[in-house]
Amino acid sequence: MKKTKLFALTGVSILLMSISSAYAADFNFTFAHVLIESTPNARAAVKFKEEVEKNSDGRIAINIRPAAQLGGDVEIIEQTQMNLVQIAIPPTGNLANFDPKMFLFDLPFLMPDEAAMMRVLDGEVGREILDGLEKSNLKGINYWGAGFRNMTNNVRPITKPDDLKNIKIRVLQAPTVMATYRTYGANPTAMAFTEVYNGLQQGVIEGQENPYANIDSMKFYEVQKYMTLTHHTYHTYAAVMNKAAWESLPEDLQVVVKDAFDLSRDYARQLTLEDEKAIYDRIKDEIEIIELTDEGRAVFIEKSQPLYKQFERQLTPELIAKAQAAAKGEE
C-alpha cells in the first residue's frame, strides 16, 4: 500500500515539476501539427523542442501538440495567426489559401529530385515566398518536408494521366492540387488527413496521394490495391511562427530558435530518406507497387503544363521562371 502511495506521489511530483518548469520559462510556446508521432517530421518536432529548451537554458518552453489534437492543418494555421498556437508546420498546399505564392510548390514535376528541391526551397525562391506570409500575421522560418508524393488507389494501376479518369481521389484542401487532378481527369475531394483511412475503407474515396511516411503511418496500404511511384510533388511543410510571438523574442533567442528550425529541417529530411527504403520493403507485399516509366513520366509532365499557365497570375511568370531555373541549377 505504501509503495502505491509513493508511486502516486512521485507521479504528482513529476507533473508539478514539469508545470513549474514551464511557468519558470520566459516564453511558453505551443507547437501544433497533425502528424502521427512516429513520422520523421513529428520526430523532428521533438528534436526542435530539445534543441530550443537546451540552447535557451530553459528560457523557452515548447509544448508539442501532435496528431491533430488541436484540429486539422487549416485550423492550426488560423490558431497560429491568432497566437493561440505559436509554432506550426502546415503543408504549403494549405498555406496557399492564405498566400497564393505557396501554390508554386504543388505544381507537379517542378522539383524532380532532392537536389532540385533544396535549391528551390532553401534558396532565394523559397525565402521570397516565406517572407510573403508576414501580411498574414505569420513568420515563415524555413521548409520541412516528408518526401515526394505518390499515388494510391483501388481502381486500376496508374501508369499515365488517363488512368486517373473518374477516380475519386482525396487531396489536400489546396486549389493547385485540386486543379492538378481535374487536369488528369480524376474527381478530387478535399478531406481531413485523419479521415482518409475510413474514407478509403468505406469507398467514399477510391484513392489518395501522400509521401511514403504518411502512407505507412496511416496504413493506407491496408485499404488500397495499387501504388504508383509518381514522385510528382515534394510534400513541403512550411515552418511558421505567430509573427508577434517571433517578435517577442530577444535577438539571442531568435538565433536559438532559427538554428533549431534549421537543424530539425535537416534531421527530418535525413529521417525521411532513411525511412523510405524501410517502408518500401515493409509494404511491398501489401500493395502492388508500380514504377512510373520514363515514357509515363513524360506524358504526366506534358499533361501538367497547362497548370503552370493556369496559376501564372497568382505566382507571376517571373517567379515560375526563377523556380524552374533554380530546380535545374541554372540560377
Image (spheres, rainbow, N blue to C red):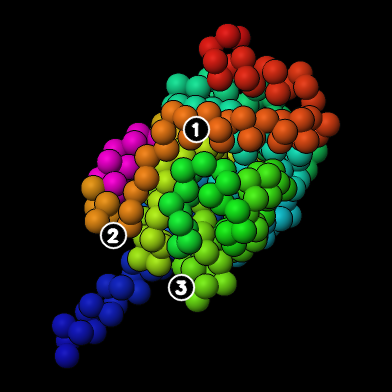
Magenta segment, principal secondary structure? helix
Query: Percent x, y for residue 17?
Result: 39, 63
Give the image location of residue 217, x and y in percent. 37, 58
Identify the mark nearer the N-term, 1 or 3: 3
Q: Are marks 1 and 2 in contact (CB under 8 Å)?
A: no
Q: Residue drawn at (50%, 22%), measured in percent from left and top?
A: 116
Q: Which mark is residue 286?
A: 2
Residue 195 appears in the figure: no
Q: Nearer the viewer, mark 1 or mark 3?
A: 1
Residue to which mark 3 is pinned: 201
Q: Residue at x 78, y 22 (%)?
A: 317
Q: Earlier in the sequence, mark 2 or mark 3?
A: 3
Q: Are there few (<14), some (14-19), or many (20+) residues within 10 Å of tag 2?
A: some
Magenta part of the chain:
269-280
| Helix, strand or loop under label 2 | loop
| Residue closer to the observer: 240 or 148 | 148
Farthest residue to the bottom: give it.
Answer: 1
Residue at position x 41%, y 33% in the image: 293
Element under label 1? helix
Q: Is residue 243 magenta?
A: no
Residue holding disc 1: 297
Whether the residues at callouts 2 and 3 have beta carbons within 8 Å, the answer is no
Q: Amino acid at mark 1?
A: Arg
| Residue 272 lies within the magenta run | yes
Residue 149 visible within the image = yes
Q: Amino acid at mark 3?
A: Gln
Q: Position of residue 152 (x, y in %)?
A: 45, 54
Q: Quadrant of the C terminus?
A: top right
Q: Residues within 10 Å of mark 3 (few under 14, many from 20)?
A: some
**Of the pair 262 and 93, the residue shown nearer to us:** 93
